[in-house]
Image: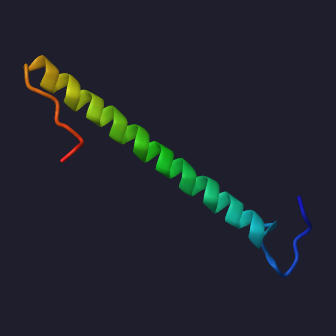
Amino acid sequence: MAPVTDGSFLGFAGNTWVVFASLFFISLQIAHLVWKWRRQARIDTARTAAGLQLESLEK
């Protein structure tokens, strides 16, 4: 770990915090996409079980 200087916060330089923030944001995006895909799969399964057609993505 880099020594604490005036340009650091909690022992990490600014560019390191940008990397942390970027990784956190990417992980949030991945979690949101997985949630959406699983939710849509449950909706599609329920519609198929009810004998309904699946909704088209094209409009």
The image shows residue 58, relative to residue 4, as above or below, that is above
Q: Position of residue 43 (x, y in %)?
A: 20, 31
Residue 4 horizontal/vertical position (percent): 87, 71
Q: Among all residues in the image, which is located at the extreme right?
A: 3
Give residue 19's position: percent from left, percent from top. 70, 60
Residue furthest out toward the left: 51
Q: Nearer the viewer, residue 46 or 20?
A: 46
**Residue 34 at x, y = what percent?**
42, 38
The quadrant the N terminus occupies is bottom right
Quadrant hosting residue 51: top left
Determine whether, in the image, residue 59 is placed left or right of residue 1: left
Q: Residue at x 25, y 28 (%)?
A: 42
Q: Residue at x 22, y 44 (%)?
A: 58
Give the side of residue 20 with respect to residue 51, left or right.
right
- In this image, 47 relative to 4: left or right? left
Q: How is the image coloured?
A: rainbow
The residue most toward the bottom is: 6
Q: Name above or below for residue 19 compared with residue 32.
A: below
Say left or right for 33 vs 15. left
Eyeballing the image, is 14 above or below 34?
Answer: below
Q: Residue at x 90, y 64 (%)?
A: 2
Counting every numbered tag in the picture gives 0
Q: Nearer the viewer, residue 37 or 57?
A: 57
Q: Nearer the viewer, residue 6 or 27?
A: 27
* Residue drawn at the location 48% of the way across and 50% of the way down: 29
Question: Residue reaching furthest front?
Answer: 59
